[in-house]
Image (cartoon, rainbow, N blue to C red):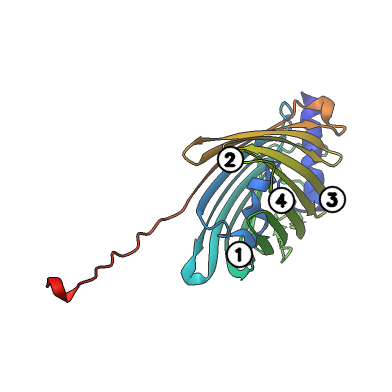
Amino acid sequence: MKIRLTVASIFSMVLLANAQQDPQFSQNMNNRLMVNAGYAGTSGAICGTAIGRSQWLGFEGAPKTFVLGVDMPIAALKGGVGLTLVQDAIGVENNVYAKLAYSYHLKLKTGTLGLGLDLGMMNKSLGKGLNPLQANDPSIPVNGAAATVFDAGLGFYYTSPKFYAGLSSSHLPQSTFDLGTSKYQARRHYYITAGYHYQLNPDIELRPSIFIKNAATTQFDINCNVHYKNKLWGGLSYRLQDAVIVMVGADVYKGVKLGLAYDVNTSKLNPYNNGTLEFMLNYCFKIKTEKPRQIYRNVRYL
């Protein structure tokens, strides 16, 4: 237990010493708003998605993350808006993000191009629990510390009935958290996403996709899900030098979708954890407006 706690604490401090990193997810194809403001409203529906992730089960101090994203199109704004809330904890570190996104939509043939900007804030706090090897070490905030900074991101997202692709960047200002004894910078992240819907027959559809994140390190995910009648799905994903992921999901009730991902770690951390669990809940709906009733009068019947 002490070994695991020590490793977790060291891992947390290494992340802090380098730069602020965005949390990691396996069901990235269902979490596009968080990484790309251009996505907001492009589905043409009001959508809400929540994802909870417990990484490296059995590893004390391991990351636990929750994200909630809501977006919708607004015709009057010629685009869409979105809200993203993130809570990410690892070791004694806790991060909270909140950001609003606006995407301007351009029609391109059969698809839509979203040009997006998000603005928000990030809060970093260090709780009690750090035990310095040297007593009264001024560089280690044993009583905790917190700081809040401004954040912004930019994204371009294109979607059509069978294809989507996105290019985006988060933490454009690279703001610095000043925690008194230490300072940590939110490093700029770059994202590339793309996916395709291939109809095998009237019931079965293949949905391969890729997800690339570049910051201090590069995360590269290759995914493929098989959808049956748009009600059930299952698939596999491979995260380069990190994990093999199994994904399943279902439309459980009138458009309410549940998804589950389980990561089998393939790195050197494999002996010290029992994998990663991730749950997803999604619901989308369109507001239907009835056309005004038209009445025609004929002078013959007046």
Q: Amino acid at mark 3?
A: Thr
Q: Residue at x 79, y 34 (%)?
A: 244
Residue 214's place in the image compared with 141, above or below, is: below
> Residue tagged by mark 4?
196
Amino acid type at mark 4: Tyr
- Could you say whether the residue bearing mark 2 is in a helix, strand or loop? loop
Instruction: Return the residue nearer the eye: 75 or 15.
Output: 75
Q: Position of residue 199 (x, y in %)?
A: 67, 45
In screen coordinates, is 51 left or right of 192? left
Mark nearer the N terminus (1 vs 2): 1
Relative image position of residue 118 (x, y in whole percent): 62, 64
Residue 230 falls left or right of residue 74: right
**Residue drawn at (80%, 41%) of the image:** 239
Q: Which residue is mark 3?
A: 217
Q: How many numbered badges does the structure rendering display? A: 4
Name the image quarter holding the C terminus. bottom left
Give me the disc on residue 139.
none
Quick one: label 4 or label 3, which is nearer the N terminus?
4
Amino acid bearing label 1:
Leu
> Which dot, 3 or 2, sits closer to the camera?
2
How many angstroms separate mark 4 from mark 2 (CA)? 15 Å
Residue furthest to the front: 300
Q: Position of residue 90 (x, y in %)?
A: 70, 40
